[in-house]
């Protein structure tokens, strides 16, 4: 459909015109590439121990130095980033799909179900997210998959509430009423009339959520209740690095830098996406 | 003949967009004498609202305005810097908008708004309360005490518009620009507000620019009318003359439709077609694609304004007169 | 107009209440208050009123976008009021609507062709292969070129979009089309186009139209009969020309401007909400008596097909 393609092209042009967004997208892309290709391209494996060379500082063969097992820190950070990203993304994806779906349905139907969902979301909101995640890990047991689930549960109310509020607005729009008058089935209304018109803020929220999820994962794994060693994740590496911070500060530091870079990229990218929505609406009104 | 309150020559306003620039106001000339109400009539996309906003420097960021002449009481407005213009705008130039409730500060009550205006006019030391009550009574609110304590969101559209008119009365400006002030109001309230405008005009010796899309409203209120189409004035003259003998086919169409509705016509006369695309306008007269009386020369070159100094028309059909 | 006209829809004592607002009526606000009227096949019935009169709520309740709190909505004999979404489905085809704001009545993410194809698809009006042709036909029928099919709603002007809206409603060949202030947001010259289009369509297909507007003159052009609403109540209803030549209800007279001097200059009177009991217009009416304030008058028959809700209409002189 050429009209669609034209529209996407216009959106892309808008996005590329926003320097912060492009910068954020660039960093995010860099991080993704590093975590996938970069890890593979490294000559070391994350478990390759070299006891002749423990806790050595940054040098050409080991740009981030080595840890207490003589493992190359850069390699571990790259693999760790991959794990952290996957864990976070999986959790956020689950929260986004479940939260948005429930939020949309409850807003559209209204009534007791809506009230129940919102009270449940309020309950989850009442806890500071990290504390909630920690509690969940204790209840569910440690391990990588459960970290995803914990992230999903802490972020679920955000998507549910956002989707619900937006749906309440869109539901009253004449075009939705027109669809009802045409006897369009409810599931189709939700999918084709409502969802496309509320997707943008949800996507922005997801992008920022992944950043947030990485922090939670890092925190949980740092405390030992998340991803379990020897699987590297950014939090696990930080836990190692903390132990011998006095002798070899680079481990903890470089991992922290890696997390910050990923967060920066994702946040800027998310902001850029958000900017993309607003001026587009304003410009459209001027036409 | 006293000097005009407002004198504009060749006003042009354009918007800079991604795809190019869009000239929304294309060379507007007008003058308003003290005590005179000029109606600026046009449909959406005619540029009438942007004309008003251009005069008051209320344009959005991507708009560019130029004018050969833009004088208020002899002063060239284009030479004033932002601070000087602000001082003038709050004191001598008033604007009444389409959405009255939006013109108020939502956190402040009605009495605060009136007080601000009165102080601006008479100085900070004046006893504003009696003047505020007087102003509200003058617009048909017999017991102002209750209304003065209300917040803007508690006002109905009609009530808010009345209060705005009261504020204008209290300010005693020299120029009032009203942009579709009755469009969102119900018929009965609209009639009341229009009669208030008549009262406003007789009390203040100000110049009025009354922007509207409604021909009949303009006919009942204004001394002179200017009809705008696609950013240009296509006909301008005394109200009586323009209504009795409209020269431009677009004016004729607008009047015919307005009258037809009031007089139970058999069929409503349509003005076929739509506004031209202003990014790539047609050659010649901008109205020619929709004009039943269009001739070859209309499509070739844009007509200038023809006719006697009082009643001018941008149409080759008016050239003979 | 033929004498024996089939009754298409009949509203009996219809009321629609919303929670909150409380006009001393309790915690509920009656947007539509005990309204009874009839829409005949092939006729255009206008409902005129100002904002707050309940005319839009009436239209939406009739189409079952809202659930009425009392009364019956008889469509060809079947009461739609108590039916749920599933039971209403077979009736949906027959009852369509054109909205006040053309731009928001279309999904901004869908092209014109997609919006027009939706009803065709949902009701299996034509086979898949014939859809593009059907969409083009729908566009042509309302005076638009098929070139519009791939445009998005924001690329069309208000007048063009309203045409598409009418085209969309007509694809289902409804018996009743509700036009809710369908021309109010359009420019005067475009208004004429849309009104002419509605008239042509109505005459060609003998469709019934419920035309909601605040502009009496627009109603006069299009409607066979006109009903006047005030604060949820139907105060007068009758053939168009009778309403215009000889309005009876004081509010109708005020709307038509024949009682200019009687309109209260007092802003607070016109802004104040009416009493919850008694004639709703009593607080503004120059002819009100104590009897008027006691109970809202029922509809009284003035002439064939002309009814009025006023105790004193016989005594009030014509303007």
Image: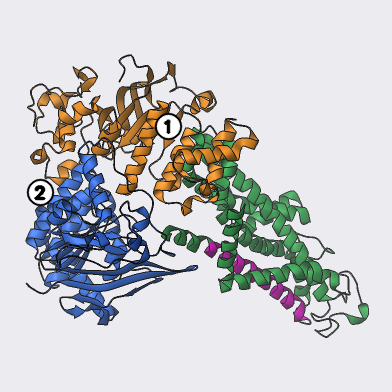
Q: Residue at x 85, y 72 (%)?
A: A41
Q: Which chain is orange?
A: C
Q: Residue at x 61, y 62 (%)?
A: A208
User: What percent of the width, then of the height, locates residue A187?
Assistant: 60, 37
Note whether residue C5 is visible.
yes
Q: Looking at the picture, does residue B157 appear above or below residue B281?
A: above
Quarter of the picture containing the N terminus of chain C is: top left
Q: Which chain is green?
A: A
Instruction: Indicate which disc residue A282 carries.
Output: none
Extent of the magenta region: A248-276
| Residue B117 image-quadrant placement | bottom left
| Residue A238 as seen in the image, left or right of residue A98 | right
- Secondary structure state at the residue bearing disc 2: loop
| Residue C76 as seen in the image, left or right of residue B198 | right
Colour mode of the rendering: by chain
Q: Which chain is blue?
A: B
Q: Looking at the picture, does residue B7 appear above or below residue C73?
A: below
Query: What residue sits right under mark 1 in the picture?
Result: C66
């Amino acid at each position: 459909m050429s009209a669609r393609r034209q529209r996407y092209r216009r959106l892309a042009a808008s996005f590329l015109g926003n320097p912060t967004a492009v910068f954020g997208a660039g960093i995010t892309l860099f991080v993704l590439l590093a975590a996938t290709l970069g890890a593979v391209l490294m000559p070391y494996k994350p478990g390759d121990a070299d006891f002749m060379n423990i806790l050595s500082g940054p040098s050409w063969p080991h740009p981030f130095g080595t840890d207490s097992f003589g493992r190359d820190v850069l390699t571990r950070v790259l693999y760790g980033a991959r794990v952290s990203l996957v864990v976070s993304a999986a959790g956020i994806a689950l929260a986004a799909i479940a939260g948005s779906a429930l939020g949309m349905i409850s807003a559209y139907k209204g009534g007791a179900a809506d009230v129940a969902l919102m009270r449940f979301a309020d309950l989850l909101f009442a806890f500071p997210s990290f504390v909630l995640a920690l509690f969940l890990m204790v209840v569910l047991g440690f391990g990588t998959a459960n970290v995803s689930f914990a992230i999903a549960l802490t972020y679920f109310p955000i998507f549910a509430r956002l989707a619900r509020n937006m749906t309440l607005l869109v539901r009253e729009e004449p075009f939705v009423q027109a669809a009802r008058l045409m006897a369009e089935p409810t599931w189709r209304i939700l999918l084709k009339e409502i969802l496309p018109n509320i997707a943008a803020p949800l996507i922005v929220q997801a992008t920022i959520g992944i950043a947030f999820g990485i922090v939670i994962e890092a925190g949980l794994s740092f405390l030992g209740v998340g991803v379990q060693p020897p699987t590297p994740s950014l939090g696990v590496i930080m836990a190692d690095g903390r132990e011998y911070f006095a002798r070899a500060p680079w481990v903890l530091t470089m991992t922290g830098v890696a997390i910050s870079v990923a967060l920066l990229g994702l946040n800027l990218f998310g902001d850029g996406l958000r900017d993309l929505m607003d001026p587009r609406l304003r410009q459209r009104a001027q036409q | 003949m006293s000097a005009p309150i407002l004198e504009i020559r060749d006003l042009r306003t354009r918007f800079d967009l991604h795809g190019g620039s869009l000239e929304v106001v294309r060379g507007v000339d007008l003058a308003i004498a003290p005590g005179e109400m000029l109606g600026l009539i046009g449909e959406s996309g005619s540029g009438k609202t942007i004309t008003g906003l251009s005069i008051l420097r209320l344009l959005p960021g991507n708009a560019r305005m130029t004018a050969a002449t833009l004088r208020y009481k002899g002063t060239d407005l284009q030479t004033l810097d932002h601070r000087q213009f602000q001082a003038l705008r709050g004191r001598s130039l008033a604007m009444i908008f389409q959405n009255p409730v939006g013109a108020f500060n939502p956190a402040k009550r009605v009495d605060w708004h009136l007080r601000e205006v009165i102080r601006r006019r008479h100085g900070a030391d004046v006893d504003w309360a009696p003047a505020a009550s007087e102003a509200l009574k003058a617009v048909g609110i017999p017991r102002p005490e209750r209304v003065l304590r209300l917040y803007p969101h508690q006002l109905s559209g009609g009530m808010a518009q009345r209060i705005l008119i009261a504020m204008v009365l209290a300010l005693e400006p020299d120029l009032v620009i009203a942009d579709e002030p009755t469009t969102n109001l119900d018929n009965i309230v609209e009639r009341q507000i229009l009669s208030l405008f008549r009262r406003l005009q007789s009390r203040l010796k100000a110049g009025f620019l009354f922007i509207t899309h409604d021909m009949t409203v303009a006919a009942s209120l204004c001394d002179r009318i200017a009809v705008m189409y696609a950013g240009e004035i296509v006909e301008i003259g005394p109200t009586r003359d323009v209504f009795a003998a409209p020269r431009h086919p677009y004016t004729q169409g607008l009047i015919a439709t307005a009258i037809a509705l009031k007089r139970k016509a058999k069929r409503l006369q349509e003005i076929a077609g739509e506004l031209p695309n202003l990014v790539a306008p047609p050659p010649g007269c901008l109205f020619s694609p929709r004009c039943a009386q269009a001739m070859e020369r209309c499509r070739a070159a844009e007509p200038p304004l023809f006719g006697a100094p009082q009643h001018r028309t941008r149409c080759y059909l008016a050239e003979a007169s | 107009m033929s004498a024996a006209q089939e009754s298409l829809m009949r509203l009996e004592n219809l009321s629609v209440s919303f929670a909150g607002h409380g006009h001393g009526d309790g915690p509920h606000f009656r947007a539509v208050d005990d309204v009874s009227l009839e829409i005949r096949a092939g006729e255009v019935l206008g409902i005129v009123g100002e904002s707050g009169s309940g005319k839009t709520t009436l239209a939406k309740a009739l189409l079952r976008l809202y659930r009425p709190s009392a009364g019956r909505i008889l469509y060809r004999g079947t009461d739609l009021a108590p039916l749920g979404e599933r039971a209403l489905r077979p009736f949906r085809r027959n009852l369509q609507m054109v909205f006040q704001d053309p731009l928001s009545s279309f999904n901004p993410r869908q092209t014109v062709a997609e919006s027009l194809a939706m009803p065709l698809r949902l009701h299996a009006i034509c086979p898949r292969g014939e859809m593009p042709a059907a969409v083009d036909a729908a566009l042509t029928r309302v005076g638009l070129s098929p070139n519009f099919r791939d445009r998005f709603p924001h690329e069309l002007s208000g007048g063009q979009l309203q045409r598409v809206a009418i085209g969309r409603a007509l694809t289902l060949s409804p018996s009743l089309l509700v036009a809710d202030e369908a021309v109010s947001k359009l420019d005067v010259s475009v208004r004429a186009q849309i009104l002419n289009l509605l008239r042509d369509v109505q005459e060609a297909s003998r469709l019934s139209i419920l035309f909601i507007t605040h502009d009496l003159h627009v109603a006069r052009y299009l409607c066979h009969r006109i009903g006047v609403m005030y604060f949820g109540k139907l105060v007068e209803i009758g053939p168009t020309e009778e309403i215009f030549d000889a309005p009876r209800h004081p509010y109708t007279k005020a709307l038509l401007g024949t009682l200019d001097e009687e309109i209260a200059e007092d802003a607070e009177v016109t802004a104040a909400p009416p009493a919850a009991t008694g004639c709703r217009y009593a607080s503004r009416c120059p002819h009100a008596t104590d009897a008027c304030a006691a109970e809202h008058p029922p509809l009284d028959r003035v002439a064939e097909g002309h009814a009025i809700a006023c105790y004193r209409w016989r005594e009030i002189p014509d303007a």
